């Protein structure tokens, strides 16, 4: 799947992104560290290299459990947006995570990417709900869901292993009924949220 809106693109992450991924991650280490998923103690299965990470993500994609995107700006590798925990049946929901190179922050690129990916999940894949979990301290990310009109649905103590420990998260969600004309359209036209 490839999605595009203006300068922002989403395409499957590939082994060929290795050089750009490493360069961007090295330059952004301090920027990303407080928000980065880390490996819980005792988990020996987590991927340790970019190659292993991409293989793991693509395995999940083939099993219809994930959509691992590279986020591009003007075709340049700029970050990641990953749809994970895709569940069918009576749930039909998925989680979404994202990060962007600091040099591209503050231009609304991630909200655009989240809107495009949500529309794809809700209206092409037929999912019902997209969830985003955010640490209470992460003001920029809280702004992303606020600007897109995600609804706050709960608080999860010690929810994810981030930056070396189990961290509390605020949970946000968007259902298909809440954006019948699509999230990207709403974001681009800045229609008032109900
Ligand atoms: C959270 C994040 C993805 C937002 O992406 P983005 O494309 O910059 O999103 P926006 O342009 O909509 O900016 C969101 C907010 O970031 C803040 N921001 C803008 N430029 C910034 C900068 N240079 N440095 C820090 N924060 C900045 C602003 O508060 C902005 O809100 P505003 O639109 O009300 O001014 C990005 O900050 C990031 O990658 N952070 C590190 C990783 C991370 O936190 N991932 C999410 C985990 S839940």
Image: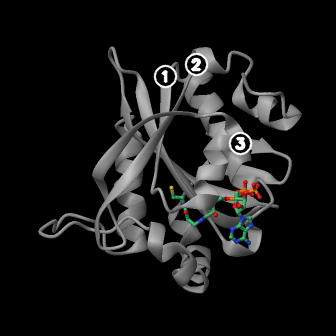
Mark 1 element type = loop
Q: CA distance from mark 1 to mark 2?
A: 8 Å
Q: Is residue 5 left or right of residue 183?
A: right
- 10 Å crowding of disc 1: few (<14), some (14-19), many (20+): many
Whole-percent x, y for residue 70 in the image = 60, 57
Q: Residue at x 77, y 63 (%)?
A: 106
Identify the residue position indicated by label 1 in the image: 127
Mark 2 element type = helix
Identify the coloring: one colour
Q: Is residue 157 visible?
A: yes
Question: Within 8 Å of ligand 1, the CB of disc 2?
Answer: no
- The label nearer to you, 1 versus 2, is 2
- Which residue occupies the foreground of this view, 55 or 146? 146
Q: Are marks 3 and 1 in contact (CB under 8 Å)?
A: no
Q: Quadrant of the C terminus?
A: top right
Q: Residue at x 16, y 68 (%)?
A: 44
Q: Is residue 2 visible?
A: no
Identify the residue position indicated by label 3 in the image: 147
Identify the residue position indicated by label 2 in the image: 176
């Amino acid at each position: 799947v490839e999605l595009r809106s203006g300068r922002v693109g989403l395409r499957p992450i590939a082994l060929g992104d290795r050089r750009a991924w490493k360069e961007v991650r090295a330059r952004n280490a301090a920027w990303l560290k407080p928000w980065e998923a880390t490996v819980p103690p005792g988990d020996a299965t987590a991927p340790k290299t970019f190659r292993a990470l991409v293989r793991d993500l693509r395995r999940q994609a083939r099993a219809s459990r994930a959509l691992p995107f590279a986020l591009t700006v003007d075709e340049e590798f700029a970050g990641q947006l990953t749809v994970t925990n895709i569940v069918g049946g009576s749930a039909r929901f998925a989680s979404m995570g994202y990060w962007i190179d600091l040099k591209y922050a503050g231009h609304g690129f991630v909200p655009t990417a989240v809107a495009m990916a949500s529309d794809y999940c809700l209206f092409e894949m037929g999912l019902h709900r997209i969830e985003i979990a955010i640490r209470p301290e992460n003001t920029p990310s809280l702004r992303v869901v606020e600007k897109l009109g995600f609804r706050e649905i709960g608080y999860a103590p010690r929810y994810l292993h981030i930056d070396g420990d189990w961290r509390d998260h605020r949970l946000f969600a968007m259902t298909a009924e809440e954006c019948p004309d699509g999230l990207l359209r709403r974001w681009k036209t800045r229609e008032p949220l109900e």
